[in-house]
Image (spheres, rainbow, N blue to C red):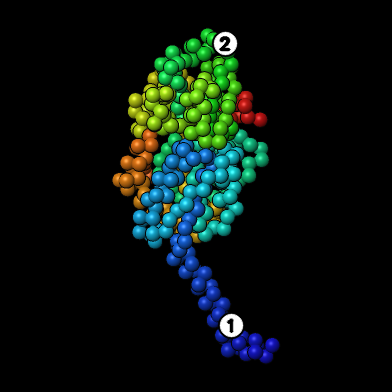
Amino acid sequence: MKFMNLLKSSGILSLGVVMAIGAAGTASADYPTKPIKLYVGFSAGGGTDTTARGFASYVHEIAGMNGMPMVVVNRPGGSGMQAAKIAAKSKPDGYTLHIINSGTFAAADMASKNAPVNPRKDFTSIGCMTQLVTAMLLQKSNPAKTAADWVKMAKASGKTIRWSTSGAATMHASIGHLFLDTVGIKHQVIPFKGGSKSRNALVAGKVDVGFIGVHLVKGFEKEIHAVGVPISKRDPANKKVPTFGEQNLPALDVAGPMCLWGPKGLPADVTSKLEAAVKGVAAIKGFKKYMKKSGLAAFHVTAANSVKKLDALYATLGPVIKKIKGYQ
């Protein structure tokens, strides 16, 4: 006890506390000093996974990232929310991040009464590097060659259409539900834990049509093709695919920015380094080439604009999700 009092009176104990605080402060200043985990809420091969792996392959080249690697971890389930939960509950030190398209982030939250996380309250925005665009995909063997032709044929058949999508409450699923309900086609959704699995079901003829990312046609051009996208202008990475509007079909004009998120409370200096990393990777020629080859366009959206786009998607998809028969 006398020894402790001596330390206090001499100021040595206080100095130790100050040194400890200083060490904690430099921890984030030196960030990163170890590998970073990037959680993906869908299976390998889909748009989210493809973007995550491309980003992870180049992020170590950014000066402020100290050459540290990024490891992609797939945790499919809950329309991406299982992975989101892991990231949200992690220590806010920048070593556990989440990547998801904002359309799905908003849709999954609004479609569930018991969503495990709140995208607008539990995360720190870091920025975006591409976007996902939903498309109607058909087998090449289908006699319908346009979305408009398919709608006419499907309605005339009077049959219940089986369709695939990635996740039960994703942006793709929401658009599929709304479109089919709006044009008056009876339908049954078959959700999968990722876009690649949804595409494979269409290729195998297990479903009649797919509502998934337009980029997923890449590598399967002999088996399937995209016949329409629900946006006002053609996707810059897939300019040959006409919009629904061009075919006099209902359109939502919705695309999902693919963004990086950290847990709430991420230190400002760590957030700043990660924001710079997103911007830097989006500008790397190798990343641009990789994304183009994958059917996606690389571009940068700031963290602030990422939040604005998420808010806009809540406003756009909110009324849609309330009307969807498949969501309760």
> Where does the C terminus fall, quadrant-wise?
top right
Please tell me which of labels 2 and 1 falls first in the chain: 1
Does residue 313 lie above or below 65 as drawn?
above
How many neighbours does mark 1 have within 10 angstroms: few (below 14), some (14-19), or many (20 or more)? Answer: some
Q: Amino acid at mark 2?
A: Gly
Local crowd at mark 2 within 10 Å, few (<14), some, or many (≥20)?
Answer: few
Residue 158 — which label?
A: 2
**Seen from this angle, which residue lies furthest top?**
156
What residue is shown with label 1? 13
Which residue is nearer to you in this view: 161 or 107?
161
> Which kind of residue does numbered mark 1 sit on?
Leu
Q: In the drawing, does residue 263 fall left or right of residue 213?
A: right
Instruction: From the viewer's perspective, tell me whether residue 90 is left or right of residue 299.
Output: right
The picture places residue 160, in percent across and down from the top left corner, at 59, 16
Q: CA distance from mark 2 to mark 1?
A: 81 Å
The location of residue 60, given as percent across then percent down, is: 39, 55
Towards the viewer: 45 or 36: 45
Q: Which of the two discs, 2 and 1, sits closer to the camera?
A: 2
